[in-house]
Amino acid sequence: MPQFQRISLVHYHELGLKGHNRAAFEKRLMYNIRTLLEDAPVEKVTRISGRVLVMYLPDADTDAVSETADLLARVPGVARVSCGFVCERDLDTMYAAADKALREAGAFSTWKVVARRSHTDFPVDSMEMNQLVGAYLCERHPDKPVRMKHPDVEVHVEVVQGHAYIYAQSIPGVGGLPVGTAGKVVCLLSSGIDSPVAMWRMARRGATCIGVHFSGRPQTASTSEYLVDDIAHVLERFGGIARVYVVPFGDYQRDIAGMVPPALRIIIYRRLMMRIAERIARKEGAKALVTGESLGQVASQTLDNLAATNAAVDMQIFRPLIGSDKLEIIADAQKLGTFEISSVQAPDCCTLFMPRSPETHAKIADVEAAEENLPWKEWVDEIMDRLELHEYRCPSSYKSAKPAQVAPSAAQVGELSSLS
Ligand code: ATP
Ligand code: MG
């Protein structure tokens, strides 16, 4: 039985557009992948010009490999993941690897071989390899026609110095930029459907995301906090969250409810949340706040009310879902894997002390007048002293427990650079 080792090749288009920043972006993506694959059956991760090469342990089973490839496809910055093998530069071994790669590529009807030789020290050139590997596969798949234009599967055979890389299966990635390349943001994270999706969108643009969750505790149970923790564990798998600050907010809401006109309660809760989030952002060195609001979705999300909320802080607020429909957001939450968690009903500060008819067109002057009697400055100071911090594994803030891997040698880097 010929020996070949399983690999994934990670492609990253958008990084290619970044000109002289490219090296830093590649380094970051590489570091993120190494960190996120720490528990995967991986022997090494090396940077090669234009791609990242992931080599699996020889005894890694196919399920673990496909799980790892699926995870890689969801890491921000990854445009595509190809799966296959690395083997000796021996034609019989390469044929067998190509056949296995094609069989594992999923359902297909048409295919072709794309062979490339980057070192002339291998006697067979690209054209001949196309023909030889093609002929071998034709014999084994007589009912599957070859198609040169837009086949269902391309079997890639890349011969470099020392090895051959052979892959066919290709999974689209989430794209975007590696986490840690765009600075930090603070996301207001409820246990609802929208805010985890908003946070994920920012992570996909390279931001390091810090959550702040306002719990109804001690006026409610802590269910929403457990749900937020579950959501954070989903985002953590792809590096989408660094830490979450939990704020027991129930008593402040009770006090606000007793001191301001009912119609303005929600706006005033929101403004206090924003002020706390802003203080956390300054402490963390974050440069923006993020919410999951979508225009007109509920009473607090009208243009007037959003403006009244913005006016409480002196920091930019991003709302990545502002133009999205609920159904689109739900579809994204399902893809992300947070929808089911978010669908569990939990009393949090949103459900606490809600007025019967909230104001939909709040005037900033009225809101400020209502706030005059509130000791909100003292509240913010008090809350900042009582923040509860939960840490998650995020490559941009996480220090590996394992020793750093040795950087790839110049020869390894050169080996595949000529192919990209
Ligand atoms: P979500 O599904 O994200 O909770 P929603 O449609 O339920 O959103 P609201 O409850 O009005 O809308 O919340 C709007 C935004 O305010 C949320 O997307 C989130 O960013 C923030 N937010 C609301 N409640 C909380 C909370 N308890 N903790 C932190 N942020 C919150
Ligand atoms: Mg909500």
Image: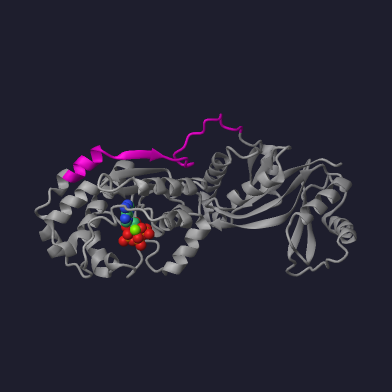
Question: Which image quadrant shows ligand 2?
Answer: bottom left
Span highlighted in magenta in the image: 379-406
Image point 59% across, 38% down: which residue? Answer: 39
> Closer to the camera, 284 or 420?
284
> Closer to the camera, 211 or 348?
348
Is residue 96 rendered magenta in the image? no
Evaluate whether residue 317 shows in this view. no
> Closer to the camera, 13 or 161?
13
In this rendering, would 38 be left or right of 3? left
Evaluate whether residue 175 shows in this view. yes
In this rendering, would 394 be left or right of 130? left
Image point 22% across, 52% down: which residue? Answer: 272
In this rendering, would 136 be left or right of 395? right
Q: Quadrant of residue 385?
A: top left
Would you place residue 258 above or below residue 298 in this image?
A: above
Q: Position of residue 93 (x, y in %)?
A: 85, 45
